[in-house]
Image: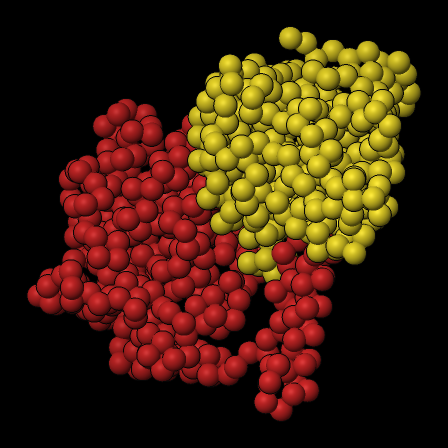
C-alpha cells in the first residue's frame, strides 16, 4: 500500500490534487508537525512502520524519532502520557491502532483528558488529538470493526468528529490539532482508500455539519462511512423521482443543531444513518434532537437506520449487518408519503 | 548498571531511628541541619493541617478528608526533595505535600470542601491537580517528564501513589514507559499498609514493592517512611539521578495510615487497635524532635514558635472552610471546553431561568 497522491498544483506550501483519505491524513500530520514544534505524533507502530494503515508513513523518517515515535504497547500509557505532555506545553496526536483497542485508554480519556480543563477552571487545557480508525466494511475480524463513537460523544469535554471525504480528512485533522480542546478523531477505515480532491488551503471549523447533496423531499443525516451509503441511496431515489438531501453530520460533539434543524425543516422528513448499534447511540441522540426541534415541520416520524444491537458481525456476516442503500431506501419509503398524497 | 544495583535493600533505609538516634549508613548521608529543621517545621505544620482538616469534616465543613496523619515524613520529604522548577504529581491523600510546595492551604482543600474539583493553578507552584483515580497520575508524570526531556529541560518530576495503586495497570504502564524512555521521574510509593480496608498482602506477593523496579530496569529502594531524614536522603539521590540523566527510579516508603481511609470509613472493621497503637512509637514527629533536641538544634522557644506558626495555618484553614464561597452556577458550563458549545449555552439558559424563577417565587421552585 502506498499513500502517494496525485498532486496537480503545488504552490507556496499549499497543495491541490486528488488523493486518498489516507494520504490526506498523512499530509495533515506532516504539515502540522512541520508548522508547530509542539506537535508530537506517537502510538503503536506509527514510527518505522508508518502505522498499520500507513497514516503516519514517512513521518518519523522525515521529522525524526523525537517527533513521531513508537511507544510500548500500552494504550493507557499512550493516553496518560499524552495528558502529561499536554500539561507541559505539547500538542500530542496519538494513534489508537483500532477502535476496540482504544478501550484500555478509556479511563484516561474520560477521567482526565475530558475533565482536565473543567477541573482546573481552564488553567490546564488538553490540546490532544486521539486518532482512532473505526467502523467496519473492511472484512476485519472481531475487535477491529467497532463503532465506539457513542462512548466518546457521551463524555462532556470531548470534541468528537469523523470525516467522510479526503478534503474533510485534511482540513478536519488540521483543525483538530489546532484546537485547544481534546478531539476524538474517528477515521472511517472503509474510506481510507477512497479518493477525492484536496486543497490544503481549505480550513474548516469543528462543530459544523456539511450539506453533501441538495434535495427537497427528505433529509438523510449520516456520518463517516455511512455518507457514501446515503449518497448512493439519494442517487437511486432521484432516479425514482425523489429529491433527497444528504447532510454529513461530521461533528458528533458538539452537534451542529442549526444546520441540521434548518435542513430537516426544509424537507419535513429525516432518516438518520449510522453503522453503530442503534440503542443509546449517536443516531438516537440525533433522532431525538431533530424530533424535539422540528416536530411541527415533520410529515413523518424521524427514522433511524443503524447497525443491529449485536456485536459487530464476523467478516462473512458483514453484508447483513451494515446499513446499505437498500435499507436506507426502505426507510425513506416508510416516511408516510401516502398521507401527503391523500391530504 | 549492574542488576544488583537495581534491587532494594532487604531492610528499609533508616538514618534516624525511633528513639531519635542516628543510624550509620554507608551510602546515604544525613541531611544537613538546616534541611532537618525545615523538615521538622513541615512535619509540625503537616500534622496540624491533617488534624484540623479531620476536625473540619466532623464539623460538616468539608465533604471528606483522606488524612495523611502518620505519613507526614513522606509528604514533607517529597516536597523538600524537589527544586522550585520541578513538578509534583500528588494523589488525594497528599494535601500536606501540596501545601508544602507552596499552595495555599485553603486552595488545596477546595476539592475536599466541595467548592470545585481543584483549587489552584498547577503552573503556579508546579503541582498537578490531586488525582483521585488511582495510579493515573503516574502516567501524567511520565508524559510531563517526556516533554521536559524533549525540550532539553532539566526538570524532575516526582509522582506519588499508595500501595494499593501498585496493583493498577497504569502503575505498570507508567514504570515501563518512564524506563523505556529513560525519563527524569521519581516514583514514590507511600506504602501505608492499607488500601481502604485491603492489606498489602492482598496487593502483592513481591518481596517488597520496591522490588518491582528491577522488572522495569530501574533502581528501586526502600526507606523508613517515618524517618524524614531517610526519606530526604533516598529521594534526594533519586532526584539527582533523574536530573543528571540517570533515568527514573522507584522508592517505597514504609509508613502507616494512622487514621481511617477517610471520615466515612470505619477501620475497626479490618484492623486491630493494637496494631495502630504500635505505630505511635514510630511517629515521624516525635523521633525527629528527639533527634533535634538531643543535638541541641531545637529548644522550647523554637518549639513554641513552630507550634504558633502551625496554629496560624490551622486558623486560616478554619476561617477559609467556615466561610461559604460565592459559588457561580455558570461555572458548571464555563470550563468544559475552550468555547461554550451551543448546547452548553442552551443548558445554562435553562438553569439560569430556573434560578431566576426560584428567586422570584417566595416558596421557591414551581410552587
State the image coordinates of residue B74 (x, y, percent, origin top left).
Answer: 31, 57
State the image coordinates of residue B4 (x, y, percent, origin top left).
Answer: 23, 28
Can you tell which quarter of the image residue B90 is in? bottom left
State the image coordinates of residue B201 (x, y, percent, origin top left).
Answer: 16, 46
The residue at 27%/73% (across/down) is: B298
Quadrant of the snapshot with the N terminus of chain B: top left
State the image coordinates of residue A314 (x, y, percent, origin top left).
Answer: 48, 19
- Using the image, determine if residue A54 lies above or below residue B19: above
Q: Residue at the front extreme?
A: A342
Q: What is the drawing colour of chain B? A: red
Quadrant of the snapshot with the C terminus of chain B: bottom right
> In the image, is A271 to the left or to the right of A202?
left
Q: Which chain is yellow?
A: A
Residue sitting nearer the eye, A53 or B338: A53
> In the image, is B76 to the left or to the right of A304?
left
Asked whether the viewer can see residue A40, the reply is no
The residue at 69%/30% (across/down) is: A330
Residue sitting nearer the eye, B7 or A23: A23
The residue at 39%/31% (across/down) is: B176
- Using the image, determine if residue B367 lies above or below residue A224: below
The residue at 69%/74% (across/down) is: B353
Amino acid at each position: 500500500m502506498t499513500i502517494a497522491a496525485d498532486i496537480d498544483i503545488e504552490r507556496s506550501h499549499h497543495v491541490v490534487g486528488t488523493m486518498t483519505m489516507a494520504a490526506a491524513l498523512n499530509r495533515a500530520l506532516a504539515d502540522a508537525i512541520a508548522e508547530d514544534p509542539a506537535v508530537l505524533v506517537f502510538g503503536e507502530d506509527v514510527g518505522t512502520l508508518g502505522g498499520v494503515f500507513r497514516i503516519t508513513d514517512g513521518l518519523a523518517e522525515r521529522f525524526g524519532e523525537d517527533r513521531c515515535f513508537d511507544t510500548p504497547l500500552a494504550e493507557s500509557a499512550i493516553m496518560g502520557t499524552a495528558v502529561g505532555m499536554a500539561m507541559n506545553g505539547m500538542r500530542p496526536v496519538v494513534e489508537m491502532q483500532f477502535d476496540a483497542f482504544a478501550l484500555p485508554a478509556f479511563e484516561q480519556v474520560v477521567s482526565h483528558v475530558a475533565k482536565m480543563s473543567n477541573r482546573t477552571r481552564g488553567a490546564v487545557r488538553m490540546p490532544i488529538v486521539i486518532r482512532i480508525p473505526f467502523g467496519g466494511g473492511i472484512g476485519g475480524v472481531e475487535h477491529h470493526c467497532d463503532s465506539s463513537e457513542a462512548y466518546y460523544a457521551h463524555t462532556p469535554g470531548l470534541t468528537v468528529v469523523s470525516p467522510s471525504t479526503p478534503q474533510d480528512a485534511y482540513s478536519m485533522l488540521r483543525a483538530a490539532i489546532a484546537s485547544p480542546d481534546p478531539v476524538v478523531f474517528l477515521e472511517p477505515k472503509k474510506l481510507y482508500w477512497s479518493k477525492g480532491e484536496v486543497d490544503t488551503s481549505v480550513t474548516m471549523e469543528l462543530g459544523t455539519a456539511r450539506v453533501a447533496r441538495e434535495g427537497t423531499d427528505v433529509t438523510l443525516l449520516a456520518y463517516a462511512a455511512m455518507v457514501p451509503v446515503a449518497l448512493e441511496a439519494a442517487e437511486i431515489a432521484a432516479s425514482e423521482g425523489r429529491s433527497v438531501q444528504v447532510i454529513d453530520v461530521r461533528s458528533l460533539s458538539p452537534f451542529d443543531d442549526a444546520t441540521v434543524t434548518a435542513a430537516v425543516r426544509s424537507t419535513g422528513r429525516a432518516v438518520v444513518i449510522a453503522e453503530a448499534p442503534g440503542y443509546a447511540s449517536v443516531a438516537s441522540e440525533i433522532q431525538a434532537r431533530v424530533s424535539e426541534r422540528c416536530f411541527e415541520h415533520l410529515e413523518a416520524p424521524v427514522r433511524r437506520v443503524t447497525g443491529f444491537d449485536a456485536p459487530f458481525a464476523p467478516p462473512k456476516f458483514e453484508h447483513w449487518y451494515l446499513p446499505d442503500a437498500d435499507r436506507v431506501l426502505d426507510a425513506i419509503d416508510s416516511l408516510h408519503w401516502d398521507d401527503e398524497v391523500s391530504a | 548498571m549492574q542488576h544488583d544495583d537495581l534491587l532494594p535493600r532487604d531492610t528499609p533505609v533508616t538514618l534516624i531511628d525511633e528513639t531519635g538516634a542516628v543510624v550509620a549508613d554507608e551510602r546515604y548521608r544525613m541531611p544537613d541541619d538546616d534541611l532537618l529543621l525545615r523538615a521538622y517545621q513541615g512535619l509540625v505544620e503537616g500534622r496540624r493541617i491533617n488534624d484540623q482538616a479531620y476536625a473540619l469534616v466532623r464539623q460538616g465543613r468539608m465533604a471528606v478528608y483522606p488524612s495523611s496523619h502518620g505519613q507526614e515524613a513522606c509528604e514533607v520529604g517529597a516536597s523538600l526533595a524537589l527544586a522550585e522548577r520541578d513538578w509534583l504529581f500528588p494523589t488525594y491523600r497528599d494535601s500536606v505535600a501540596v501545601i508544602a510546595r507552596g499552595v495555599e492551604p485553603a486552595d488545596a482543600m477546595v476539592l475536599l470542601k466541595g467548592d470545585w474539583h481543584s483549587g489552584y493553578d498547577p503552573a503556579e507552584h508546579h503541582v498537578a491537580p490531586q488525582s483521585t483515580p488511582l495510579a493515573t497520575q503516574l502516567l501524567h508524570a511520565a508524559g510531563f517528564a517526556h516533554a521536559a526531556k524533549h525540550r532539553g529541560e532539566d526538570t524532575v518530576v516526582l509522582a506519588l501513589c499508595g500501595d494499593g495503586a501498585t496493583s493498577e495497570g497504569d502503575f505498570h504502564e507508567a514504570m515501563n514507559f518512564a524506563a523505556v524512555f529513560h525519563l527524569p521521574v521519581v516514583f514514590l510509593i507511600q506504602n501505608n499498609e492499607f488500601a481502604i480496608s485491603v492489606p498489602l498482602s492482598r496487593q502483592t506477593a513481591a518481596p517488597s514493592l520496591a522490588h518491582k523496579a528491577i522488572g522495569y530496569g530501574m533502581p528501586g529502594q526502600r526507606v523508613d517512611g517515618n524517618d524524614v531524614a531517610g526519606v530526604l536522603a533516598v529521594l534526594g539521590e533519586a532526584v539527582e539521578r533523574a536530573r543528571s540523566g540517570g533515568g527514573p527510579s522507584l522508592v517505597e516508603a514504609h509508613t502507616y495510615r494512622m487514621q481511617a481511609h477517610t471520615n466515612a470509613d470505619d477501620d475497626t472493621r479490618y484492623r486491630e487497635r493494637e496494631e495502630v497503637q504500635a505505630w505511635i512509637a514510630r511517629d515521624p514527629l516525635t523521633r525527629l524532635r528527639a533527634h533535634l533536641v538531643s543535638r541541641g538544634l531545637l529548644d522550647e522557644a523554637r518549639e513554641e514558635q513552630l507550634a504558633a506558626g502551625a496554629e496560624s495555618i490551622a486558623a486560616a484553614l478554619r476561617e477559609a472552610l467556615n466561610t461559604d464561597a460565592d459559588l457561580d452556577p455558570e461555572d458548571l458550563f464555563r470550563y468544559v471546553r475552550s468555547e461554550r458549545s451551543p448546547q452548553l449555552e442552551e443548558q445554562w439558559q435553562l438553569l439560569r431561568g430556573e434560578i431566576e424563577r426560584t428567586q422570584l417565587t417566595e416558596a421557591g421552585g414551581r410552587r
